[in-house]
Amino acid sequence: MPVIEVTNLHKRYPGKVAVHDVSFSVERGEIFGILGPNGAGKTTTVESVIGLRKPDGGTISVLGMDPVRDRDGVRSRVGVQLQQSELPERMRVREALELYSSFYPDPADWRELVEQLGIADKADTAFRKLSGGQKQRLSIALALVGNPEVAVLDELTTGLDPQARRDTWEVIQRVRDRGVTVLLVTHFMEEAEYLCDRLSLIDAGRVVATDSPTGLIARVDSGTRLRFRVSGPFDPAVLTALPCVTGVRRTGPQVQVTGTGDLLAQVSAALGTAGITAADMRTEHTTLDDAFLALTGRQLAG
Ligand SMILES: Nc1ncnc2c1ncn2[C@@H]1O[C@H](COP(=O)(O)OP(=O)(O)OP(=O)(O)O)[C@@H](O)[C@H]1O
């Protein structure tokens, strides 16, 4: 039985339908992502999953419970990290963790958690003195201190620098390694690609597709893409004449070539024969962004 099952969720706010029709299910032990642009309905969906919002239509089951009817049951078994959780400025890390531990019948050892999350040396630091990354780690620790079976994490790494983001991803993998099922909301394609076993792409309140990151990418894989820079004259016909090339696009000094087969070797050889010097030649792979674009006609980022 899935740990989380959302079926035809519909949720409206006054004058606005935030979620039209969302269905997905999350299996035990997986990291499941909900990926979509700002305003797609991701937060409304997860807030419904944890019982903070009452659906206008559809059904939700979390560990076999209805999150609205059995809110306490869900609360005791699901750890939640919502966007921008704030604590009193002067509250120390230790105090916050002890307070949250007191809410649960069988809390985790918070010292062990902060150790794993790399903020053990901050136990006596006040919330306001923590960096963005440390606050984020604390909020993950608070989401996990009740020993939950499921962790729901919304916009986990928004506002973090690239290194802190990567560190946080490792933390989430360790959380899953402890047997926790993770539902992760993000609008960062790299985050979804790196972390998620499966994910739903969501746009304008609807699920566009659900699959593994590689499965989603394979749906739109349009072959290989090369990118390089040229400084002098460049006639695209040198490349369009090659059977393996399907397209050449030039934007200023940047050239993008799409095609199939052994594109890199053939393009390099043709450029060499024509005496064209290409710099920074690299192969680009299809990303979730490309998948989102192909499935919705819109870019994920921006
Ligand atoms: N309390 C509310 N009242 C009215 N409209 C709302 C409310 N909360 C969200 N919305 C609207 O519903 C839509 C979906 O919002 P939601 O926060 O679920 O999207 P999201 O995908 O999580 O976006 P973001 O990443 O920006 O948080 C948006 O158009 C938003 O403006």
Image (cartoon, rainbow, N blue to C red):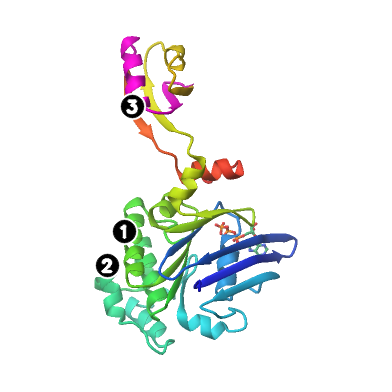
Q: Is residue 113 left or right of residue 241?
A: left
Q: Which residue is mark 3?
A: 281
Q: Amino acid at mark 1?
A: Asp
- N-terminal of the pair, mark 3 or mark 1, is 1
Q: Which residue is mark 2?
A: 118
User: In the displayed structure, would residue 134 be above or below residue 51?
Assistant: above
> Quarter-wise, where is residue 139 in the image?
bottom left
Towards the viewer: 5 or 116? 5
**Span colored in magenta:** 250-276
Disc 1 crowd, CA 10 A, few/some/many (<14, 14-19, 20+): some
- N-terminal of the pair, mark 2 or mark 3, is 2
Which mark lies nearer to you, 2 or 3? 3
Q: Is residue 23 left or right of residue 213?
A: right
Asked whether 256 falls inside the magenta stretch, the response is: yes
Q: Tag 2, which secondary structure?
A: loop
How far is mark 3 from mark 1, CA to CA? 30 Å
How far is mark 2 from mark 3, CA to CA? 39 Å
How far is mark 1 from mark 2, CA to CA? 9 Å
| Mark number, residue 110 | none
Q: Which residue is mark 1?
A: 167
User: In the displayed structure, would residue 129 be above or below residue 281?
Assistant: below
